[in-house]
Image (cartoon, rainbow, N blue to C red):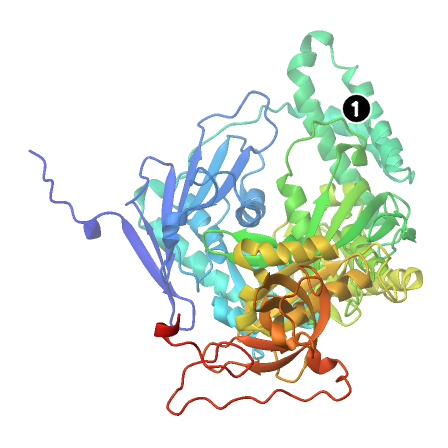
Amino acid sequence: MSDNNISFETLGTELSFDLGDGRQVTIETGRLAKQADGAAVVRMGNTMLLATVCCKKEAAENADFMPLQVEYQEKYAAVGRFPGGFFKREARPSEYEILIARLVDRALRPLFPSNFHAETQVLVTLISGDKNNLPDALACLAASSALAVSNIPFEGPISEVRVGRVDGQMVINPTVEQMENSDIDMIVAASMDNIMMVEGEMKEISEQDMVDALNFAHQAIKIQCQAQLDLAAKVPTANPKREYCHENNDEELRERVNKETYDKVYAIAKSFMGKHERNDAFDAILAEFLETIPEEERDEKEPMAQRYYHDVQYHAMRNMILNERVRLDGRKMDEIRPIWIKTDYLPSAHGSAIFTRGETQSLATCTLGTKLDEQTIDGAVVEGTNRFLLHYNFPPFSVGEVKAIRSTGRREIGHGNLANRALKPMIPLDDPSFPYTVRVVSDILESNGSSSMATVCAGTLALLDCGVKMKKPVSGIAMGLITDEETGKYAILSDILGDEDHLGDMDFKVCGTADGITACQMDIKINGLSSERMAEALEQAKRGRLFILGKINEAMPAPREDYKPFVPRIVQMQVPKEFIGAIIGPGGKIIQEMQRETNTVINIEEVGAFGVVDIAAANVDDINAAVARIKAITQVPEVGEVYHGVVKSIMPFGAFVEFLPGQDGLLHISEVDYKRLENLDGILKEGDELDVKLVAIDEKTGKFRLSRKVLMPKPEGYVEPERKPRPEGHNGPRRDGHGRPPRRPENK
């Protein structure tokens, strides 16, 4: 009979390491998800991530790529919350989850063997959340750990860390509280030897600061990689890695392809054609070669010939750049493609601009909205609101393709996020005089390299055209790298083309102002990028960035002086907190009526001891009308002040007059006129407007006593009626303004 007394401690394997500041990170395996090919749990504080990896045994027939799927999901139960929405369960991934999945995917993908084509799925799940320790910096460590303890071929391990700089000191995986005072927020992925991926935002840091941050991150990552190696050494199933054979090769065919097409491809690469002409010429060379394969062998050999032909293109283009120091379109290494700009292109948009650089074109629009247009963020870990949105769209016609239009893709979300990070620090969201919610949309109309950087430039121009008082304009540039490990030759390319990105070794996007870097994104496809070469690439990027900024300044030297006539104007005012309810009214009646009658949009938010009121309208007159209404509601009635009121109701003893919004007072019949009136027939009726003076406020009840006659000239010879004193000992209220005490019960 088996022993059922199994303890948690005796299961699996775990290992811990120190982040360098006393905080411990623990990796465990062998306890959860044991039927996966590999599984690991990473914990820091109360944040725990479960990563699993599964891989098919064989690749699909004729597969020539790595079908890798990376997903990240946050469980709301991990932080003790219910998901929002009608179904109350986790559904499609949020943008935050997609961005984390992209960070992991971009770091892992280059490290699978080039001839390994088995479908592989990596899933990372947040199973416990700590709101002071964000999970995004731990997701790649968890995924790589799961691969390390599996038998799946992988040229790792790797890890990712977040780098912050707080009070001038670099910090690894800073807490949420520390990040509030950090001028760097950068995720860095690396192996034991090389940096693989970088993404982040900065507050105008220098190029040297960025190099220092990358080196600091790499030192911390080396410790995490060693921890994974130590953990894998304790797991028998991690070694050896599985054997595989996912490619059929024909060396004789490879030699033929290289011999018969290389010179032709090299000539086309050096012909400086446009993108489509060059691709058509490359396709024609391949089609011509395929015709030389006997028809009975073509089905078998065509996939291999296409793969070998891609290798020919790869080497021919790279050799041309390295040997002749000239690029596919004839430019020098640091030369920027021709730029043309048009602002105020769309007459009905709040702000618009076209930015075209070579064969890449972005049409950007800027729209200003109210607080009601803010984005609500309701993630499991990250909650709050967002006043700046940037959306990037990449329709298939931008590259001359026919493709189904579906929901926003991961690439579009990632490119939009990079441009968002670049521009957001320069938008005056912290300025009380700028209470707007801002949305920038970039529609890519043409693409041949670096459409995300075109988005940054077009977005800057659209914001300026809209009249947003940006702190400084921002531009962006994409850098490439071509290297030859055998000869040591290398070329750093400014403003790369699509082919230079696809066939090159690096895609390094750098955004910033004239004074420093605000965002970056880097993916490296080779082993090894020295700090010296990184610094050289950053300096070359700076020169290109400043050149593009010059073009932006020529087209739009300053923000538009004033918003266009149809852009909503927003006025912000503060009111005492106790008046918020009076402005809103029962069930929102008063504020809804005010918005309808003044053609405005009004939003109120409680901030400390005040209510902050945002009033938006298409013109100043409507705003002034709403401001006057709100000031009237929040005005404190003062004895002796004169008010313009409206008769609300008529009684036998007088009229009730609304002299301030929501404030009624009694205009006694004796205070309507100097002459004695028996009733108000023919004198006043409901809806009449009149000026009244507040003559008294009852200390006990807070009721208001009004007078109209004190504002009228006294008739000649008029004598004020003598008021009889109250009987001794009588402290009750008088019934009317004539000084008569109330009748005793026996007199009724």
Q: Residue furthest left?
A: 1
Is residue 588 placed above or below 739 in the rendered structure? above
Q: Position of residue 558 (x, y in %)?
A: 88, 67
Q: Residue furthest top?
A: 296
Is residue 543 placed above or below 56 in the rendered structure? below
Q: State the quadrant of the N terminus.
A: top left
| Neighbours of disc 1 within 10 Å: few (<14), some (14-19), many (20+) | some
In screen coordinates, is 332 left or right of 696? Answer: right
Q: State the quadrant of the C terminus.
A: bottom left
Residue 543 sits in quarter = bottom right
In screen coordinates, is 10 left or right of 387? Answer: left
| Depth order, front residue of 395/748 | 748
Q: Secondary structure at mark 1?
A: helix
User: The residue under label 1 is which amino acid type?
Assistant: Leu
| Depth order, front residue of 159/687 | 687
Q: Position of residue 723 (x, y in %)?
A: 55, 88
Q: Is residue 522 visible?
A: no
| Depth order, front residue of 64/402 | 402
Q: Residue at x 58, y 37 (%)?
A: 114
Q: Position of residue 46 (x, y in %)?
A: 36, 60
Q: How many marks?
A: 1
Residue 333 sits in quarter = bottom right
In screen coordinates, is 436 left or right of 331? Answer: left
Q: Residue at x 56, y 20 (%)?
A: 61
Q: Is residue 119 visible?
A: yes
Query: Mark 1 = which residue?
Result: 286
Q: Position of residue 540 (x, y in %)?
A: 79, 63
| Depth order, front residue of 259/53 | 53
